[in-house]
Amino acid sequence: MEALVTGGAQGIGYQIVESLIKMDFPLPF
């Protein structure tokens, strides 16, 4: 169960980062 939650969180995080890159947002790191 924890693995599924972790995998889901990573997937969401990846989508957010990808969206920021597509919008040319300056990443704070």
Image (tube, rainbow, N blue to C red):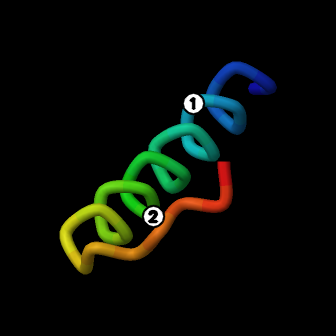
Rendered image: mark on residue 19:
none
| Residue 9 against residue 1 in the figure, above or below | below
Image quarter in which the N terminus is found: top right
Percent coordinates x, y for residue 3 in the rendering: 69, 20
Which residue is more in the foreground, 1 or 7? 7
Q: Is residue 7 left or right of residue 26?
A: right
Q: Secondary structure at mark 1?
A: helix
Count numbered badges in the picture. 2
Q: Secondary structure at mark 2?
A: helix
User: Which residue is at the far right?
Assistant: 2
Could you give the CA–CA distance between mark 2 and mark 1, rounded to whole angstroms? 14 Å
Percent coordinates x, y for residue 12 in the rendering: 50, 55
| Residue 26 against residue 2 in the figure, above or below | below
Q: Residue at x 29, y 62 (%)?
A: 21
Q: Is residue 24 left or right of residue 3?
A: left
Mark 1 neighbour density, 10 Å: few (under 14) some (14–19) many (20 or more): few
| Residue 8 against residue 17 in the figure, above or below | above
Q: Is residue 5 left or right of residue 2?
A: left
Could you tell which of marks 2 and 1 lies nearer the N-terminus? Answer: 1
Residue to which mark 2 is pinned: 16
Q: Residue at x 37, y 70 (%)?
A: 20
User: Which residue is at the far left?
Assistant: 22
Which residue is more in the foreground, 19 or 3? 19
Percent coordinates x, y for residue 2 in the rendering: 80, 25
Q: Residue at x 66, y 60 (%)?
A: 28
Residue to which mark 1 is pinned: 7
The three-letter amino acid code for the residue at tag 2 is: Ile
Percent coordinates x, y for residue 24 in the rendering: 27, 73
